[in-house]
Amino acid sequence: MKKLSCILILALSLPVLSGGQTEDLDNSINSQSNKLKEIRKEISRLNSRISRSQKDEKSTIKQIQALDKQIAMITQLKRELQKERRLKESQIGLLTETIQTTNEKIRVMKARAARRAVRAYKMGQNRDLDLLLTSGDLNQVLRRSTYLSAINNAERETLNKLQGLITANKTSQNSLARRLGEVKRNIREEDQAGKQIASRQKKKESQLKFLKKDRKTMEQQVKTKQTAAKKIQGMIQDLEKKKQERLRELARRRGMTMDQAKGEFAKQKGQLSWPVQGTLVGTFGPHKHKKLGTVTNNPGIDIAAPKGKGVRVVLDGIVVAITWIPGYGNTIIVDHGDGYYTVYAHIDNIQVNMNGYVLRDQIVAQVSDTGSLDGARLHFEVWKGKDKENPLKWLKR
């Protein structure tokens, strides 16, 4: 009887995986799937735009901009597919563990039920009555009666639980097979996305060669950059309206009062690390175009660097914008408090989230050629309220 009790305890005490783990993964996978749907829709819209612009001989720069954004979107698609695949692989691990644990429970319960059946056959149908009749006294009768009742109840519960486990296991196995199929599809789509990126990059480079020889398209490029600069200025002006809320959050994160946090960025003038190590190819202020002769104003600096090199935020702050702007490509704006903002453009593989808190020297993205017609480079700006600042005055010399 003691052995029988041990088996029952073992069967009921095998570890059970938390249902919350699987539920959390399900929610994450569903959220990721919805994000992927939106990216696929945007890529499809860009395909239509490219097809329309190809019919117009004068729209080369528009084609390049559409291709550029599509490359960025497909790159993001590939990255999100990889995230989704990792989530599904985690769920496959949990499901596999659940199936193994459940199989062990089923094995223990089946063994116990088999031994119970053999014992019942040997003793005959009146085995419980025999145990009671052979009791030495009334107290022993009561003890044996209570024990037999508990065993019979446990037996019924065990059989019901066994049936439930077998059903649950079939469901887990079906879910596992489905997830394995989804992971295979993810891998195929990731591979296809990689090929699409290479194809569109090649097409963009081909059109760039033509664009650099054409005066009208160069003029369009200048206008695009001017429009991008105005858009950033408008975004900064909008951000200024809610700067007090973000300053309060920054002060809390830094463990300071709001008054202490106000002067934090200003103290760093001439002490900030460069956002990326590279070659300075564009300085702050007015510039005369070599071929067009037109004068444009650069609101920041441009640093040529290898594609894929990490871009670091110059001081801790809150990410207040993640966007794509024609002429700038993928762009991030960080609020450092007290009306100071930094802008990072021509980037890819963004590694931060909107409203996320970032630390000084944290890598937030990688250098790319998104929005750039001159190759991989980082465009970097510093703003004080609505006024542009020369970044070179803020960076270490």
Image (cartoon, grey):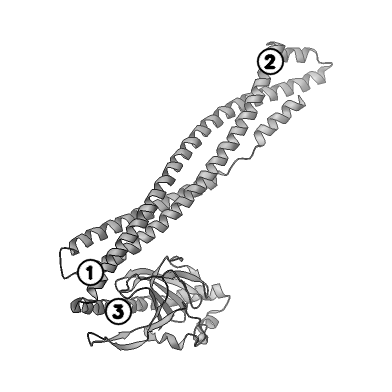
Eye-nearest disc, 3 or 1: 1
Circle 1: element type:
helix
Instruction: Say if 190 sits above or below 368 in the image.
Output: above
* Image position of 177 with respect to 371: above or below: above
Instruction: Identify which residue, 295 or 4, lies in the foreground.
Output: 295
Identify the element where label 2 is drawn. Answer: helix
Residue 106 at x, y percent in the picture: 60, 30
The image quadrant of residue 227 is bottom left
Tell me the crowding category of disc 1: few under 14, some 14 to 19, or many 20 or more residues within 10 angstroms, Cα based: many
Task: Give the residue pinned by disc 1.
Answer: 62
Left or right of 278, for residue 162: right
Q: Amino acid at mark 1?
A: Lys
Q: Amino acid at mark 2?
A: Ala
Image point (58%, 35%), residue name: 102
Count how many numbered circles sit on residues in the image.
3
How packed mark 3 is, by other alpha carbons closer than 10 Å (few <14, some 14-19, many 20 or more), is: few
Residue tagged 3 = 230
**Residues at marks 3 and 1, CA–CA distance in whole angstroms:** 19 Å
- Position of 148 with respect to 174 (left or right) is right
Q: Which residue is mark 2?
A: 120
Q: CA distance from mark 3 to mark 2?
A: 88 Å
Q: Position of residue 344 (x, y in %)?
A: 40, 75
Residue 196, quarter of the rendered image: bottom left
